[in-house]
Amino acid sequence: MKPSPPADSLDSLYKGYHGWLLVWLRRRLDCPHNAADMAQDTFIRLLGAREYVAPREPRAFLATVARRLMIDRGRRQKMEQAYRDELARHVEHLEQAPSPEQILAALEALDHIARALEMMIPRARQAFILRHLEGLSHAEIAERLKVSTKTVQGDLVQALLHCHAASESAL
């Protein structure tokens, strides 16, 4: 077995493990182009970190970062699909379908919301997703997250404030 290359810097991590990560992602994603994009997104995420600390297990570390990005991507796609589905349901009631510019603006707003979700504490993000994507009540969310209804309400307020701030910064 070939010894693993050192990962003492982000540069050496990229050089030593980018190929491995690409193969790993190709096995999990339906498209080699998506795998290449996800591999690049993984390293971009690491570039955005405050500081780089060499991982003891580089492959496990990269796989974890990539898995989290795939989850984020899935959430974003689910939000976009929910918007498109809702739009399709309402198109027949509209006098005029939205223009491409309006659709683009809505998708950009969803992207800003998705980024805001990434910046939230995990519990607030989960509460937001459970409420607005899965349609659960505050009591159901509280039960699922094992917190009080008041905590859920506070988390949802925090999440909405994050989303509002993200939409304001987009303007």
Image (spheres, rainbow, N blue to C red):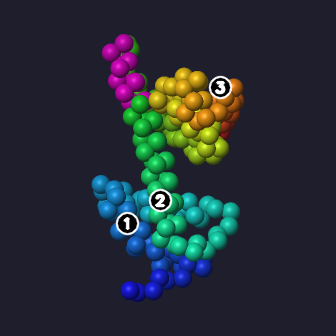
Disc 2 target residue: 66
Disc 1 target residue: 24
Residue drawn at x 40%, y 24% is 86
Left or right, 87 with reference to 58: left
Q: Nearer the viewer, mark 2 or mark 3?
A: 3
CA separation, marks 2 and 1? 10 Å
Left or right, 94 with reference to 168: left
- Mark seen at residue 149: 3
Among numbered discs 2 and 1, the one appearing first in the sequence: 1
- Mark seen at residue 131: none
Q: Residues within 10 Å of mark 2 (few under 14, many from 20)?
A: many
CA separation, marks 2 and 3? 33 Å
In terms of secondary structure, where does tag 2 sit?
helix
Are discs 1 and 3 less than 8 Å apart at CB?
no
The x and y percentages for residue 61 are 52, 66
Are discs 2 and 1 less than 8 Å apart at CB?
yes
Give 123 or 111, whichever is nearer the viewer: 123
Q: Residue 80: in sight, yes or no?
A: yes
